[in-house]
Image (cartoon, rainbow, N blue to C red):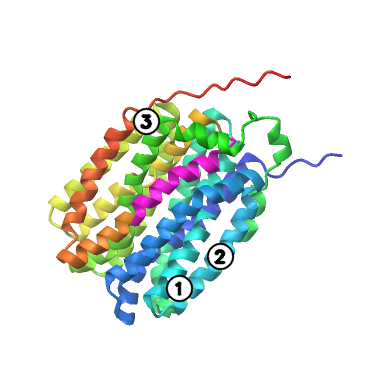
């Protein structure tokens, strides 16, 4: 008697979403630690920002390799190893007293851990579990789950800091991350069965094909801007609001609202990507983001305008992720979706590195984030223009003739 496979698409979707809820939810807490850590340890904001910038750069640099390993040997194994490293990195973050210790733990270790438990790893499994007509929507649902983590984990993280202090709060987050381990069982795939379903193509061949494709390079370049904008806001926005005489709770609530509205935004942009031309959806999203930032910095700042901006930018937050990965899957197929999505995410994380680092540098140099806000607007317009000429055509590969 053959037992039915319990790893149905619905189960894969649920467990992938919960894993991202935990992984990304904890990651979005780091901006809450900027002020308490720099004050207690007498660091500059640039010291803190450098470690988080390194984290995002390592996250991106490791992503293509962890994606290749996941495509070849299975996402579950990568997820287990990365989760353990993530938790250890959080514990060592809590014990850091110098900038280099913080860069090693928060930067290197957590960065690699995130690359093993982030979007590209689970998106490869989800992309292969769903048919093309449902794929982008499914990716949007998983992205929404990651956003739910941001909404839930930020108040949780702020409560931990308020009652336990930042050191013990990080230790509790380390234990929380370990809840990802049992969820990884749902991401085990049957590679032998898949071998009959996919075109015979090696990873080096897939890389050469993608990197010589103009539209893929344009897509990746636009994705860099996404990372630049998002990580600047994630890390520096709470401190920016304190500079504007807001309370730390206002910054926490703003980030939580971003997560809440991103739940709806990720799903809706994924749905739009399944019904309309994906490159046009991306261009619209980037341009809308630029307009929202311009309106926010032009208006008088108050808790109301902060919450309105957070809600708006949250709706636009991670809508790029399902549409970008859906476009990659549409053009190149899903066999190496984690690999090609990982390379695209490398561009995203290079942008994240620059956004966090330049934000800290401009503040320490000028005493203000004003120039940084202007830069995020200009880059949003550039990303909208970059995505416009993408050719959204599926590659048709001719099978080799038998000898």
The residue stretch that appears in magenta: 335-353
User: For the residue carrying disc 1, how many other residues have a C-alpha within 10 Å: few (<14), some (14-19), or many (20+)?
Assistant: many
**Image height check: is 320 above or below 240?**
above
Residue at image x 71%, y 41%? Answer: 190
Question: Magenta stretch: residue 338 in it?
Answer: yes
Q: Quadrant of residue 31 in the image?
A: bottom left
Residue denoted by label 1 = 93
Q: Mark 3 near mark 1, Cβ–Cβ under 8 Å? A: no
Horizontal placement of 389 versus 174: left or right? left
Q: Position of residue 223 (x, y in %)?
A: 37, 43
**Mark 3 and mark 1: span between their CA atoms?**
39 Å
Residue picked out by circle 2: 85
Nearest the eye: 353 or 152: 353
Task: Write down the quadrant of residue 124 in the picture.
Answer: top right
The residue lying at 31 percent from left, 55 percent from top is 354
Q: Position of residue 159 (x, y in %)?
A: 40, 72
Say which label, 1 or 2, has the lower sequence index.
2
Label 1, label 2: how far apart the Cα atoms are: 12 Å
Which of pointers 2 and 3 indicates the residue nearer the eye? Answer: 2
Across and down, in percent, residue 128 comes to 60, 37
**Magenta stretch: residue 165 in it?**
no
For disc 3, the marked residue is 279
Q: Quadrant of the C terminus?
A: top right
Q: Please state if 168 lies on the left or on the right of 283 as rendered.
A: right
- Relative placement, left or right, of 77 versus 231 is right
State yes or no: discs 1 and 2 in contact (Cβ < 8 Å): no
Q: Is residue 258 above or below residue 128?
A: below
| Mark 3 surroundings: few (<14), some (14-19) or many (≥20) residues within 10 A | many
Q: Dominant secondary structure of the magenta stretch?
A: helix
Q: CA distance from mark 2 to mark 3?
A: 36 Å
């Amino acid at each position: 008697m053959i037992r039915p496979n319990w790893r149905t698409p619905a189960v894969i979707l649920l467990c992938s979403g919960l894993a991202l809820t935990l992984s990304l939810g904890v990651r979005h807490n780091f901006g809450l630690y900027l002020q308490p850590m720099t004050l207690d340890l007498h660091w500059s904001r640039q010291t803190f920002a450098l470690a988080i910038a390194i984290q995002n750069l390592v996250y991106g640099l490791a992503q293509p390799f962890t994606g290749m390993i996941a495509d070849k040997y299975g996402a579950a194994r990568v997820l287990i190893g990365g989760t353990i490293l993530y938790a250890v990195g959080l514990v060592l973050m809590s014990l850091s007293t110098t900038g280099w210790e913080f860069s090693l733990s928060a930067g290197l270790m957590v960065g690699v851990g995130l690359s093993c438990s982030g979007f590209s790893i689970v998106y490869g499994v989800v992309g292969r579990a769903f048919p093309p007509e449902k794929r982008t929507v499914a990716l949007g649902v998983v992205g929404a789950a990651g956003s739910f983590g941001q909404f839930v984990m930020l108040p949780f993280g702020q409560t931990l800091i308020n009652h336990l202090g930042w050191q013990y709060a990080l230790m509790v987050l380390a234990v929380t991350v370990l809840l990802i381990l049992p969820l990884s069982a749902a991401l085990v795939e049957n590679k032998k069965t898949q071998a009959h379903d996919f075109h015979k193509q090696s990873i080096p061949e897939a890389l050469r094909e993608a990197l010589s494709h103009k539209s893929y390079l344009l897509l990746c370049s636009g994705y860099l801007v996404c990372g630049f904008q998002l990580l600047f806001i994630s890390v520096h926005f709470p401190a920016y609001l304190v500079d504007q005489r807001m309370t730390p709770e206002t910054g926490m609530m703003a980030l939580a609202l971003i997560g809440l509205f991103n739940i709806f935004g990720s799903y809706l942009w994924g749905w739009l990507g399944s019904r309309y031309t994906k490159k046009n959806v991306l261009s619209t999203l980037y341009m809308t983001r630029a307009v929202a930032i311009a309106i926010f910095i032009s208006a008088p700042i108050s808790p109301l305008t902060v919450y309105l901006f957070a809600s708006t930018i949250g709706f636009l937050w991670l809508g790029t992720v399902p549409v970008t990965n859906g476009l990659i899957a549409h053009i190149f197929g899903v066999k190496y979706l984690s690999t090609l999505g990982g390379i695209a995410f490398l561009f995203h994380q290079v942008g994240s590195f620059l956004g966090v680092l330049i934000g800290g540098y401009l503040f320490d140099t000028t005493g203000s984030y004003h120039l940084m806000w202007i830069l995020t607007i200009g880059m949003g317009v550039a990303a909208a223009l970059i995505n416009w000429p993408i050719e959204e055509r599926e590659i048709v590969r001719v099978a080799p003739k038998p000898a």
